[in-house]
Amino acid sequence: MTHNKRQIKIVILQIIQNINEKCKKELWLGKIMSQSTFSVVFHSIIFLFIAFPEVVNAVQTQDQLVANFDSKLEITTDNIAARVLGSKKRVVITVIDLFNHETQERDTQTDLLEEKFTDSLYKKLPDQVVPYFEIVYLRLEWRSTFPEIKHDPLTEDIAKLTNADWLLTGTHQTNDGLLSVSLELYDLKSEDLLWQTVVGINSTIENDLEKNAQLENGLEEEVAQKFEQNSSLFPTQNDTQ
């Protein structure tokens, strides 16, 4: 809230400063007398009271969007943590490279999101999540080891250095002020895509690939059983003769 109050204060000060400059300019030009100066200030104050609620609402709306996204992030990390704990063998997970969807490169939002997702997972699975600071350290170490390479290290290169079993990666984008993050969970050894989801639109959309495969196999078995049952009802070639 302190940050929001600071934003509101800055906006109000800017409005007052603009009013003050306008009055000084008009007085200097000799276009208004004391009465008209009072009129300008009076109308400016009215404008300020009208604009102030809109400024507050804009800040509050942004806060609501952030809070909404954070709640969806927590739900998503709960689901990921459940998958990690439900694995037949003990696995360690790392979060690396949530790229900008348009540029396919890292940016400031990438760093913020990686830290958020990692910290949320780390609170739930402190012994099975690679800490965010370790990823930062590995990036710095990689750059110092290979100074001749100008581009950022590949996702796979950093992931291998962590000795993690699973990798959470993806992209982020902002449409009409709404942030969304597309996530993909990989098994680093088999390179299989285990799970994917999109967080931050109207709802969280998940695609559990393992469950989908099980459903497909179950459906195929069910169809085969029904076909066998129904085939017994049809007359054989000997019966027709």
Image (spheres, rainbow, N blue to C red):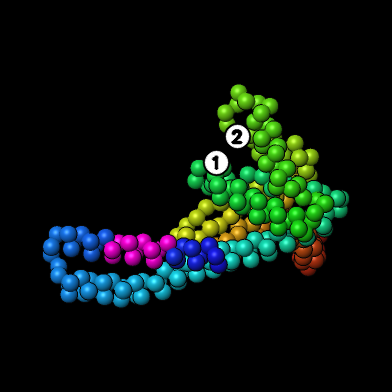
Near-viewer residue (15 or 202)? 15
Q: Residue at x 65, y 47 (%)?
A: 169
Near-viewer residue (69 or 38)? 38
Q: Secondary structure at mark 1?
A: loop
Residue 10 percent coordinates (x, y): 42, 62
Tell me which label, 1 or 2, sits earlier in the chain: 1
Residue 140 visible in rendering: yes
What segment carries the magenta color?
10-20
Q: Amino acid at mark 1?
A: Glu
Label 2 Cα neighbours within 10 Å, binned few <14 / some 14-19 / many ≥20: few
By secondary structure, the bulk of the magenta-drawn segment is best described as: helix
Badges 1 and 2: C-beta atoms under 8 Å apart? yes
Residue 111 percent coordinates (x, y): 60, 47
Say which quarter of the image contains residue 68.
Answer: bottom right
Say which quarter of the image contains residue 142.
Answer: top right
Q: Amino acid at mark 2?
A: Asp
Distance of label 1 from label 2 (alpha carbons): 9 Å
Q: What residue is disc 1 on?
A: 105
Q: Residue at x 21, y 74 (%)?
A: 39
Q: Is residue 57 left or right of residue 222?
A: left
